[in-house]
Structures are given as C-alpha cells and as structure tokens.
Amino acid sequence: MAIDGSPRREPWAQAEFKKSRGAAKECSSLLSTIQSKGIKLSELQLESRDVFYRNENAMRTPGSLRWMIEFIRRISIKTRACLLLAGVPLASQAMILPETACRTQSVEGVNIFYREAGPQSGPVLVLLHGFPSSSFYYRNLIPLTAGKYHVIAPDYPGFGHSDTPAVDKFEYTFDHVATVMGKFLEAKNATNCIFYMQDYGAPVGMRIAVKHPEWIAGLVFQNGNVYEEGLLDRFFLKKPLWEKRTGATEAPVLRNMEFDSVKYQYIHGARHPEEMNPDGWTMDFALLERPGNRAIQLELQADYGHNLTRYPEWQAYLRKQRPPTLVVWGKNDPIFGPKGAEAFKRDVPDAEIHLLDTGHFALEEDSNTIAELMSAFLEHHAIH
C-alpha cells in the first residue's frame, strides 16, 4: 500500500534510493521515467531537508502522484543533490531561504552583534568565527542550515559589528572573550547547542565546552586547531610576541594585518582563487582599519600562546566526553595543517573527518559541501 493507503500501481514510483555511489544513476533514471509520463514539474522548492515536486493539479491527482511527492520528500540530502544535477527542465525554480536577522545583545556592557536565522524551536547551531573575520564569514552557511536549525553567529568584542572597547577598557584575552561569549549564549538561552568552530572559534568554543560540557550536543571543527601537530611554520610568526612584547616582535604580527596578508589567508590553497568572492578579505581589512582595532588584535595575538597550554585539557575533554565530532578541514591551510584534523581520531575514535581541497577559509569555496556533510552528520547522531 502507498503512504496514503492507495495501491502502488506505478512501477516507476517503486524505486528504492540508497546513499551510495549509484544514487546519481538511480535518480536520473527516475526523473527520466517521471518526464516520460508527461508530468509537468512546475515548481521546485528547496528547504533544509525537504524537496517538493508539485504538479498544478497535485491536490486533485490520485494517490499515486501524492505518493511520489511524499517519496521524493523523504530522499536523503545527497540523493536530492543528485536530483538537481540530473537537470530536470522546470518552468521555474525557486529556492526558499530563511531570512537572517541582525541583532545585538548586551553582555558586560558590551553590545554583541549577532546574526540569527531558523526556527526558534530547532536545535541550536552556534557559529564561532576566527581571525580576522566575523560572523560575515558565515553568510553562505547560515541560509543552508537555518531551514532546520536555530542558527546564531555572534561577533566577538572587537570584531565585526560588536562594540570595540579600547584595550584599557576591556581585557582582550581568550579567557575573557570566552567568558563573554558564554554569558551571551546564556542570555540567548542557547545552552544546548552544536558549536561550529573556525580558527579562533576553537579556543573560544573549547573553553566554553570544558566549563559547560552539558551544553554541548556536538562539535564541528573547521580549521580550528587543538593539536600541536597541526601548527605550521606560518603560525609561529607570532611566537616571539608571546615571549616578549616589543616593537620588534609586534612588527611581523602587524604586517599580517595588512591587506595583502589578509587576502593571502583567503586565497592560499584555494582551488580557484581567481574566482573567489573578494568580499571576505575586503570586509575583514576594512574592520581592521578602524581606529584602535589593530591594538585590539595585537592583545589577542600576544595572548594566543596560552591556547597551546590548554591543548591537553581540551584533548582530555574530548576523550572523556566523546561529543559527536565532525572535522571539515581545508587541507591546504597555510596556518593549520591537515595533521591537526587527523589528530582528532586519537581522542575521539569515531570522529568523522573530511579533508577538503581548499584553504583556511573553507566556506568561501565549499559552503554547500560542508552544509551537506553537517546535515548528514547531525542526522546520523539524531541531533535534529
């Protein structure tokens, strides 16, 4: 019997789809059969999990077509991607994406800017950015995940559109930034969530996770390092600054905040740097140019050495808590190498690890791939 109770008369609607290498061929075959039946596919709607093929007369069509619609709706994300690649001729294509709201939340007298999208009742996905970026880095990922998840992407104090108190008015250390962001999550009632951590997001997020393990439903690391074997030579440009802060030790770190260096962090290791959207590095550099912002960034760069001393603690947390862990890593990153990704297996043996052919800011080239990997991973762990 079909889902609505009617007989399954059409053999073309009885195909079973699997998440396998044969999915594309199966989907293409199904679509060819659907088209041969003369069904007019007038609209395609994409949401986070559901695909609906709707005929103009679908509500008056016998149960067989309604069964087919429900059948396609249940296909996995990877198979649905194959449906699109099969190239169905459509009268129109409409992608319905959730709206992203921009808001602020006061924490310790500092206005924290954040982007928010998705159902308030959905699982909370917190996106923690790196240096020298902001929540703007997640501009492509947010609509891809907000169909199902309540997505929150904040800017740290001194970053993005959050307040930037002067260095003599605010303690710019990773400990304090993590404390402020923990209070921000409490204010947002986001204390049962998945962390997505890129670059600085790892030392910020891991401090919160260690302090509040009960908050963590899952962890996603994207070029967010917590293992010494992941540290490459370029990373150690800041090491003299940790040991002794002088004009000479500050100079190479300040050069890393110039336009060409910021752009380099985006394009190095990218598959197609000539096609990359310049908005990311242009926005980052413009924000670094604000009065006093380089002084703020120097404070955090000088404090970064303390993160390395916390690596054993964070690794112990991973071993003990074994949170569902997904690692998606631009393997051509000039700062954090792929060994940093592979090392997660040591403490979380069932961690899912994917090395992508891109650089440090992997979402600039692979937001769709990463969104699909995240959705499948979270679905597998029943985080939905």
Image (cartoon, grey):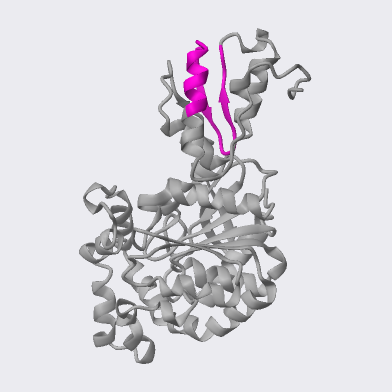
Q: In the displayed orientation, state which residue is furthest to the bottom.
A: 244
Residue 171 shows in this picture: yes
In the foreground, 157 or 218: 218
Q: Position of residue 16 (x, y in %)?
A: 62, 34
In the rendering, at what x and y percent does residue 232 appear? 34, 78
Asked if 376 appears above or below 213 in the picture, the reply is above
For residue 260, side relative to residue 54 (left or right): left
Outermost residue toward the front in this view: 11
Identify the residue at horizontal 24%, vertical 87% (top origin).
248
The residue at 43%/66% (across/down) is 223
Q: Quadrant of the N terminus?
A: top right
Q: Is residue 124 visible?
A: no
Q: Nearer the viewer, residue 331 or 136?
A: 331
Query: Measured along the vertical axis of the image, is residue 123 above or below residue 359?
Result: above
Percent x, y for residue 362? 39, 57
- The structure residue drawn at horizontal position 69% and vertical position 73%, both measured from the top left corner, is 321
Judging depth in this view, the residue of 366 and 351 nearest the camera is 351
- The verdict on residue 38 being magenta is yes
- 257 relative to 110 in the view: left or right: left
Q: Is residue 307 magenta?
A: no
Total numbered circles: 0
Vertical position of residue 50 compared to residue 60: above or below: below
Magenta stretch, residue numbers: 29-55
- Locate residue 8: give its quadrant: top right
